[in-house]
Image (cartoon, grey):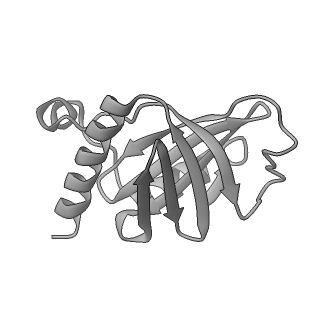
Amino acid sequence: MLFKTSQNQKKIRENLIKICGNPFSLINKIKNGYYGSPKYLLIKIEPKSFEIDFQEYTDLVYCTFEIRTKGVAVYFRYKNEEYILMSRYNQISFLNNDGILDLQINNHNIKLKVLENKSHNKFLRKFVEVRNLSSL
């Protein structure tokens, strides 16, 4: 689900906990290495919601991922508005190829450009590890 964070922040926080679960504790993050993701360059998002159109926008849009107990939250900023795309682990599929990461989250397709290969690979390993643990 895609939300604009400037609208009803309390409701968005409740939905984030309901969909993605609680964030990992600091001790758990340090112990297991569950940090956030590196920055990715957001190339395309479909379907277009909230009038987000990257073909008409000339600035670069970066996004990051937050690994949570039951899912992932994707944060990005577009035209001075912050957005969050949240999903459970079982509703996410991805394809990693030639510096491009294609994600399908719920009914949204996202195309990202990988900026840092080493940290990207480390993040994907942790993502798959947490995803597998949450399905047990």
Q: Is residue 94 visible?
A: yes
Residue in the image at 17% along x and 60% along y: 133
Residue in the foreground of this view, choosing between 57 and 83: 57
The total of numbered circles placed on residues is: 0
Residue found farthest to the left:
31
Image quadrant holding the N terminus, namely bottom right
Work out whether residue 129 or residue 29 is closer to the camera in this orientation and state it: 129
Q: Quadrant of residue 17?
A: bottom left
Left or right placement of residue 88 versus residue 7 in this view: left
Expressed as whole percent of the image width and height from the top left, the position of residue 49 reads 76, 59
Image: 107 above or below 27: below
Closest to the observer: 59 or 11? 59
Residue 72 to residue 46: above or below = above
Q: Is residue 56 left or right of residue 26?
A: right
Say which quarter of the image contains residue 70: bottom left
Residue beneath the point at 17% across and 37% down: 28
Give the image location of residue 37, x and y in percent: 39, 36
Q: Residue furthest front?
A: 98
Tell me the residue at 77%/30% (across/down).
Answer: 80
Q: Residue 44: horizontal and vertical position, in percent?
A: 68, 50
The residue at the point 61 percent across, 64 percent down is 108
Q: What is the quadrant of residue 119 in the picture?
A: top left
> Taking the image as drawn, is residue 19 in sight?
no
Q: Position of residue 132 (x, y in %)?
A: 20, 63
Q: Is residue 111 left or right of residue 129?
A: right
Q: Where 97 sits versus 115, above or below?
A: below
Quarter of the image where the C terminus is located: bottom left
